[in-house]
Image (cartoon, rainbow, N blue to C red):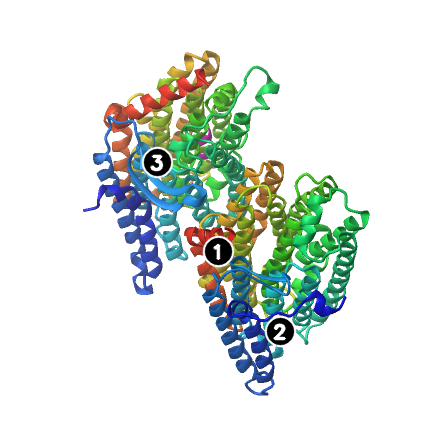
């Protein structure tokens, strides 16, 4: 039995262990590699279930802390812990991974399969690590580790313009994260001024730091250190979210990435950005965050509407889903920066829900592309009769994406709009139109693919979903409606943390 | 003043002898390697064996006597402390990797067997240069090191680029040496001493040294900036990197850079970075400017290079900029000089590894590898591709690799010292650097090769050298505590 102290570390590093096994696999066993990947993701899912059971939902404090001294001279330690903010995201990662493996594996042969599966595993290590790190340096470390597998995944197995897309993805993220690195230096340096006088990068210590902020005029704002620290962190995170105007890497990366890469990108990687905002940028620099909140809400709303309009005019199915991500991630930004308890909770739910719905939609795109080798919406049509199972799965994911009451999407977007309305009614009015636009483009896509006349003759021989694809879709459907009808069951364990988190943030805004 | 008065002879005790032992061993080994290298059939093998034994023996001696008490010889001219002993050990490590890298490469490029002896001689010069605080001694050590390197650069006899590079390096290096010597003379004229520590004391108690001092300091600074290849004095570097045989380039890029920087740091610490010294503020801002210019110039010019060695040479200029940033804050923050050593050590290891992989990829007598020529090689040779990726990521400062730890230490020291504008420049230009490092990885793994590419010479030595460097890069990237602790202990 795994001892509880190391549980989180096992979650982080077990994919890495499997990656070593994958690399050492002899060539005659190479056709078993995808089974190995599935086993790895299932192992992590089991660990996640154990974690969920062990997690104490009545406590707001970080739990299951695993501390290993790493670089104490620089105040850097390996600290992993979990609380109500990271629990849902870890669960999301743990469950989306096996589903993604099941649903997206190409039917044909994949070149350099060994390399591919080790990258998938390394990617998971990075994602778990980022969500579980409770040390700023460690957070940054894993944050960057995530980049490398994704870079190779898009670059080697991607589409025609893959190199342009992958370099753009990497450079965009690097610009933000290197400025964040400077801010991290500054924070760690400041931590030496705390009692004890030792440098420290742990969230717990850094959370006690206070930085001067004077919001009385623009001049004072831009001479306050908190402003620069906040903006440095926020830039890194909103690039990852991505928030308009830093979103342009996303459609390229999504369109060029192989399906499994897109699923991970949409379902988990984008959440790293909003998680960072929630975990670091806002609580560490609350006054600055509050001062700039209106700007972020405005950009969030612009993102919602702009993303929706872009999605409306796409003929490339994958690009459509990518732009819908831009739109849906805008809600999370709006929710986080409204500084309302209910909206903050809604943002956390929305992170998980968008992971499920966008991941699901990318899987559908993958199913179609695998069979027809096109993503052009105008080349489909009338598929519902030929592939009924796929049509049902697609419908469920569409409904989840348009936030139909009873689906998981509603559970996230509604509280965000409700909470934000209390402070910024005008913005929310515009954000609300995003919901309508969302329904229009999502249903339009469904109509162009599944309904209407057939545009090609070869569509008649299309294979419906096979058993593993159906399994993946059933699990996703359970989550879509499960969260939709019983949100408390899924998110209940985060309540205590969310409550104390929101209270603290709102308190800190008022009491510098 | 006779020579004996300047350097009074003294009786050497065991501690002094033990401190000098690596130098003796290296010199003796170099002579032996020269002799054994004369064998017509097996000269290369013999010379390699002798060189390896010598270096490993020197390494063992050095590490065994690492923590002996401080020794100062020749009236304080040569100082052996745990600090200088350990940076000497680092240079010996580079030389070991360089010698392994040369094995196999010597036959491929038609290098003479003297290459091993020359590496040993230059290593001895390097150790001397880092151990002395006497400007004249430093000049002599600089010449011992440089003369060997000039020959090494020009040694690829069948290639005209190599001769061109050797000549260029020789003439420009000679000019730099002359400037150094002239500067030394002027400084001596102004302060009455060649000793860095004495000059330091002189400056502390004398706010207004004569104008001659500043001229001399300017000449010395110029010479050192030339040796470390900082922006306005970098012109020789790309041609020399391209012209020299790749193993020599790797050794140069690691060891010479390390030594020159350590010597420069010592000079700058004693003569430039003094607090409350109005006359020196000009020099400090000059170094600030050179640091920023090197980062910007090196990184932006590297983008437009399509040849690998040339690109890496411009990236070296950029790294010089980062190191100058470390130098600039060295006296301000506690721990800054440590992070400088760490950064240099990590960078040198990755650099050696990168050139090792290039030496495997390239053809005989090739001036440089173009990016097109490495297209698809990463997928064809996964081990070499992965190794090269590790080195490039390390130079780009991406986590998992030692380059990140080095950069982290250096930049955080600079932020602690309050030098945020320069750090922001450094960080933004390193985004630029990420682009050209990634482009190499893109070519290795993501481009299809245009024609059939293959490696014709499987160089075992270079592969082993690359493996050693990669292991070190990952080890120090993931578990840097031991070496940070080690360096911290030395500074005490």
Image position, residue A357 (x, y; %):
35, 32
Image position, residue B440 (x, y; %):
56, 55
Magenta segment boundaries in residue numbering: A322-326
Judge whether residue A452 can be spotted in this image. no
Q: Mark 1 or mark 2, which is nearer the start of the sequence? A: 2
Q: Circle 1 sits on which residue?
A: B390
Q: Residue at x 59, y 58 (%)?
A: B258
Report the residue that reaches farthest toward the bottom.
B40
- Tell me the CA gap for discs 2 and 1: 30 Å
Q: Circle 3 sits on which residue?
A: A360
What is the quadrant of residue A260 in the picture?
top left
Judge whether residue A393 can be spotted in this image. yes
Return the chain for callout 1: B
Secondary structure under the numbered disc 3 in the rendered image: helix
* Pointer 1 local density, CA inside 10 Å: few below 14, some 14–19, many at least 20: many
Q: Are marks 2 and 1 on the same chain?
A: yes
Q: Circle 2 sits on which residue?
A: B118
Dominant SS type (magenta): helix
Return the chain for callout 2: B
Q: Nearer the viewer, residue B30 or A453?
A: B30
């Amino acid at each position: 039995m795994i001892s509880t102290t190391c549980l989180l570390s096992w979650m982080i590093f077990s994919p890495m262990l499997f990656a070593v096994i994958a690399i050492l696999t002899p060539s005659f066993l190479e056709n078993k590699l995808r089974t190995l990947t599935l086993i790895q993701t299932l192992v992590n899912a089991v660990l996640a279930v154990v974690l969920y059971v062990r997690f104490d939902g009545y406590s707001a404090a970080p739990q299951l802390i695993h501390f290993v001294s790493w670089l104490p001279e620089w105040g850097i330690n390996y600290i992993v812990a979990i609380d109500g903010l990271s629990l849902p995201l870890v669960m999301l990662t743990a469950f989306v991974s096996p589903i993604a493996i099941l649903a997206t594996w190409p039917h044909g042969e994949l070149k350099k399969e060994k390399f591919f599966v080790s990258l998938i595993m390394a990617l998971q290590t990075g994602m778990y690590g980022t969500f579980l790190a409770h040390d700023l340096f460690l957070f940054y470390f894993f944050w960057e580790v995530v980049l490398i597998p994704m870079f190779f995944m898009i670059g080697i197995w991607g589409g025609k313009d893959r190199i342009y897309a992958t370099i753009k993805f990497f450079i965009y993220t690097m610009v933000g994260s290197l400025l964040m690195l400077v801010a991290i230096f500054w924070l760690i340096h400041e931590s030496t001024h705390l009692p004890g006088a030792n440098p420290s990068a742990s969230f717990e210590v850094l959370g006690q730091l206070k930085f001067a902020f004077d919001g009385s005029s623009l001049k004072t704002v831009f001479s306050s250190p908190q402003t620069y620290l906040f903006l440095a962190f926020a830039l890194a995170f909103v690039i990852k979210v991505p928030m308009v105007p830093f979103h342009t890497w996303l459609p390229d990366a999504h369109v060029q990435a192989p399906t499994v890469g897109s699923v991970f990108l949409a379902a988990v990687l984008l959440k790293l950005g909003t998680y960072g905002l929630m975990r670091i940028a806002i609580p560490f620099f609350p006054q600055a965050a509050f001062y700039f909140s209106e700007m972020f809400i405005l950009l969030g709303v612009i993102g919602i509407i702009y993303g929706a309009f872009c999605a409306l005019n796409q003929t490339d199915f994958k690009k459509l889903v990518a732009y819908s991500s831009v739109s849906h991630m805008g809600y999370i930004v709006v929710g986080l920066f409204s500084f309302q308890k209910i909206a903050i909770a809604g943002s956390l739910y929305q992170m998980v829900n968008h992971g499920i719905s966008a991941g699901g939609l990318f899987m559908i795109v993958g199913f179609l592309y695998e069979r027809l080798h096109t993503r052009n919406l105008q080349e489909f049509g009338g598929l519902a009769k030929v592939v009924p199972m796929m049509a049902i799965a697609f419908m469920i994911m569409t409904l989840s994406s348009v936030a139909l009451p009873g689906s998981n999407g509603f559970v996230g977007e509604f509280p965000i709009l409700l909470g934000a309305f209390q402070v910024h009614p005008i913005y929310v009015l515009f954000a609300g139109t995003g919901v309508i636009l969302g329904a229009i483009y999502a249903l339009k896509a469904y109509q162009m693919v599944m309904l209407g006349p057939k545009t090609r003759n070869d569509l008649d021989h299309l294979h419906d979903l096979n058993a593993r694809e159906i399994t993946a879709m059933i699990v996703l459907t359970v989550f879509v409606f499960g969260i939709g009808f019983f949100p408390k069951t899924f998110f209940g364990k985060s309540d205590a943390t969310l409550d104390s988190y929101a209270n603290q943030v709102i308190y800190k805004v008022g009491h510098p | 003043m006779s020579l004996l008065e300047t350097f009074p002879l003294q009786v050497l005790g065991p501690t002094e002898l033990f401190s000098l032992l690596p130098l003796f061993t290296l010199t003796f080994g170099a002579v032996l390697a020269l002799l054994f290298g004369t064998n017509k059939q097996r000269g290369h093998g013999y010379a390699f064996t002798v060189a390896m034994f010598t270096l490993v023996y020197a390494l063992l001696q050095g590490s065994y006597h690492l923590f002996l008490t401080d020794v100062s010889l020749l009236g304080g001219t040569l100082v052996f402390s745990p600090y200088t002993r350990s940076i000497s050990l680092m240079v010996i490590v580079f030389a070991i990797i360089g010698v392994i890298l040369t094995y196999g490469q010597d036959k491929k490029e038609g290098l003479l067997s003297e290459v091993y002896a020359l590496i040993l001689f230059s290593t001895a010069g390097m150790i001397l240069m880092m151990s002395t605080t006497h400007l004249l001694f430093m000049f002599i050590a600089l010449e011992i090191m440089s003369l060997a390197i000039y020959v090494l650069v020009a040694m690829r006899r069948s290639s005209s680029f190599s001769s061109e590079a050797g000549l260029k390096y020789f003439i420009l290096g000679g000019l730099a040496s002359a400037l150094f010597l002239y500067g030394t003379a002027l400084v001596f004229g102004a302060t009455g001493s060649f000793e860095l520590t004495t000059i330091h004391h002189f400056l502390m108690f004398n706010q207004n040294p004569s104008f001659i001092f500043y001229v001399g300091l300017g000449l010395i600074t110029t010479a050192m900036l030339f040796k470390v290849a900082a922006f306005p004095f970098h012109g020789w570097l790309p041609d020399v990197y391209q012209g020299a045989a790749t193993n020599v380039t790797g050794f140069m890029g690691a060891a010479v850079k390390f030594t020159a920087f350590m010597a420069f740091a010592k000079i700058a610490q004693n003569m430039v970075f003094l607090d409350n010294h109005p006359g020196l503020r000009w020099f400090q801002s000059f170094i600030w400017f050179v640091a920023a210019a090197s980062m910007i110039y090196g990184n932006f010019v590297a983008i437009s290079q399509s040849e690998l060695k040339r690109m890496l040479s411009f990236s070296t200029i950029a790294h010089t900029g980062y190191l100058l940033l470390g130098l600039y804050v060295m006296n301000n923050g506690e721990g800054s000089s440590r992070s400088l050593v760490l950064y240099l050590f990590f960078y040198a290891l990755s650099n050696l590894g990168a050139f090792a992989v290039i030496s495997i990829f390239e053809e005989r007598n090739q001036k440089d590898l173009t990016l097109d020529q490495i297209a698809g090689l990463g997928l064809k040779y996964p081990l070499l591709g992965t190794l090269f990726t590790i080195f490039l990521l390390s130079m780009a400062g991406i986590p998992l690799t030692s380059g990140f730890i080095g950069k982290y230490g250096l930049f955080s020291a600079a932020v602690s010292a309050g030098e945020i504008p320069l750090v922001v420049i450094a960080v933004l230009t390193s985004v630029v650097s990420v682009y050209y490092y990634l482009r190499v990885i893109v070519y290795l793994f993501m481009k299809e090769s245009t024609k059939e590419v293959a490696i014709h010479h499987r160089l075992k030595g270079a592969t082993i050298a690359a493996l050693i460097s990669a292991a070190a890069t990952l080890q120090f990237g993931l578990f840097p505590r031991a070496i940070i602790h080690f360096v911290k202990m030395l500074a005490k």
